[in-house]
Image: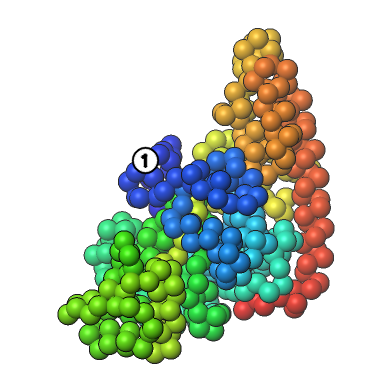
């Protein structure tokens, strides 16, 4: 079962790609200059429309990166993965938006507003300490009037039957939990409001459990925009969702075009056409949203197996854990070792089944170190005891440095654009 609020059982990523139309990420790698390690190592396994972001990075065009965190528990290494993706896109030129989903935590987990704020600030300090720049937009959902107003507008386009089909809601689902889905859509589309510079490609790095929000938001982005686009061999077919009179406005654009009763065919480079038409829509009061792009990363395994989850303290290493406490958790983590040291020397280890090796892959080692550890493990030269000892040292060292930076960040939070 995979929903935005619950993940259980074995996750079949190939099945997710096939059933929900997620595209494999690997074919894009050669098009990205200096891709981040999560891309190269297959941790980011899929995407929707990420080519828009690749083109924006390559051409130096404006784009945004947006994701959020539900403050239902302390930030941990699973959250760090998303934080690293946001920071990487931010460094590649994207304007960063970070939402603290306190409305979701309040509605779904029944946490008090005071508690969601207290926990939410820890997420904020952590992502800033990891390198988020000062021009980023950081906010709590409950304090962001633009998000809530947009959510209300988007909610007009969704009915109960659709929410039931997407999320599996039933007669026991509260209205607040249902409304949170439109708030999430408001989060995702926030970077494209006129206040933040208007329509632009926006990537949302998430785990596969959040794909229902992406699918709904992509549909809503189209429903609330005036013009719809269909690529042709020699141009773009444009339709209006708001009536024939809007198609007449296209005559103001200097393109070769042919008018029909229900659409207009424009014969010019598609990217240029769509950009100009979106500018026109914004000028007449429309949204002109670009369908949001997304990347999907694999779930990080809990220390004792299963998914790392804030609701299961034994499953995660918190970014706030005292380093020595985190070290003890690492010592108890599952490994891919054999039954005995002799057997492991003879047969080699199984890093693909090892929580420690996953920590190395996602968080702790560079490419050269990772290759060396994997080779030594598979050949039986590296036993689990020595490997865990190194992991303990790396985790403790990382947490000491991060927590020092978080303490330093706390003294300069007023330099950031935090809506709280």
Please state the horizontal and vertical placement of residue 394, each as a whole percent of the image: 77, 40
The answer to whether any part of residue 41 appears in the image is yes
Q: Residue furthest left?
A: 261
Q: Look at the image and tell me in which quarter the N terminus lies.
A: top left
The answer to whether any part of residue 66 appears in the image is no
Please state the horizontal and vertical placement of residue 27, each as a whole percent of the image: 48, 44
Q: Quadrant of residue 393?
A: top right
- In this image, 151 relative to 376: left or right? left
- In this image, 43 relative to 284: left or right? right
Mark 1: secondary structure: helix
- In this image, 151 relative to 240: left or right? right
Which residue corresponds to the image point at 82% horizontal and 58% vertical from the top-left?
404
Q: For this rendering, which residue is in front, 87 or 264?
A: 264
Residue beneath label 1, please? 15
Which residue corresponds to the image point at 81% horizontal and 72% vertical from the top-left?
411
Q: Look at the image and tell me in which quarter the C terminus lies.
A: bottom right
Please state the horizontal and vertical placement of residue 416, each as a whole percent of the image: 71, 75
Q: For this rendering, which residue is in front, 302 or 313?
A: 302
Which residue corresponds to the image point at 67% horizontal and 77% vertical from the top-left?
417
Q: Quadrant of residue 159?
A: bottom left
Q: For this rendering, which residue is in front, 272 or 32?
A: 272
Q: Residues within 10 Å of mark 1 (few under 14, many from 20)?
A: few
Q: Residue furthest front?
A: 256
């Amino acid at each position: 079962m995979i929903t935005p609020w619950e993940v259980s059982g074995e996750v079949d990523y190939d099945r997710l790609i096939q059933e929900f139309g997620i595209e494999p990420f690997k074919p894009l790698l050669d098009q990205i200059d200096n891709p981040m390690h999560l891309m190269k190592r297959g941790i980011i396994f899929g995407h929707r429309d990420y080519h828009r972001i690749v083109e924006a990075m390559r051409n130096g065009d404006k784009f945004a990166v947006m994701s959020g965190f539900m403050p239902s528990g302390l930030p941990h290494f699973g959250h760090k993965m998303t934080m690293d993706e946001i920071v990487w896109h931010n460094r590649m030129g994207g304007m960063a938006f970070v939402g603290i989903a306190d409305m979701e935590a309040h509605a779904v987990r029944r946490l008090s507003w005071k508690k969601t704020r207290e926990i939410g600030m820890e997420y904020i300090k952590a992502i800033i300490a990891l390198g988020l720049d000062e021009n980023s937009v950081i906010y709590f959902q409950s304090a962001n009037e633009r998000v809530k107003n947009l959510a209300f507008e988007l909610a007009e386009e969704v009915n109960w039957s659709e929410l039931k089909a997407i999320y599996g809601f039933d007669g026991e689902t509260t209205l607040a939990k249902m409304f949170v889905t439109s708030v999430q859509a408001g989060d995702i589309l926030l970077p494209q409001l006129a206040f933040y510079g208007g329509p632009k490609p926006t990537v949302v790095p998430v785990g596969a459990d959040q794909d229902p929000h992406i699918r709904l938001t992509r549909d809503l982005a189209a429903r609330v925009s005036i013009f719809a686009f269909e690529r042709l061999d020699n141009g773009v077919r444009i339709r209006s969702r708001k009536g024939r009179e809007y198609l007449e406005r296209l005559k103001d654009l200097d393109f070769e075009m042919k008018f029909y009763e229900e659409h207009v065919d424009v014969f010019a480079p598609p990217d240029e056409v769509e950009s100009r038409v979106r500018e026109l829509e914004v000028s007449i009061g429309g949204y002109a949203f670009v369908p949001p792009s997304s990347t999907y990363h694999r779930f990080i395994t809990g220390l004792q197996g299963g998914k790392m989850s804030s609701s299961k303290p034994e499953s995660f290493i918190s970014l706030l854990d005292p380093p020595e406490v985190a070290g003890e958790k690492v010592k108890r983590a599952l490994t891919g070792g054999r039954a005995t040291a002799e057997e492991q020397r003879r047969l080699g280890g199984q890093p693909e089944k090892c929580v420690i090796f996953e920590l190395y892959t996602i968080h702790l080692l560079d490419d050269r170190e990772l290759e060396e550890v994997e080779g030594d493990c598979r050949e039986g030269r590296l036993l689990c005891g020595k490997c865990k000892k190194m992991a303990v040292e790396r985790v403790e060292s990382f947490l000491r440095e991060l927590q020092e930076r978080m303490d330093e960040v706390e003294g300069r939070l007023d330099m950031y654009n935090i809506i709280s």
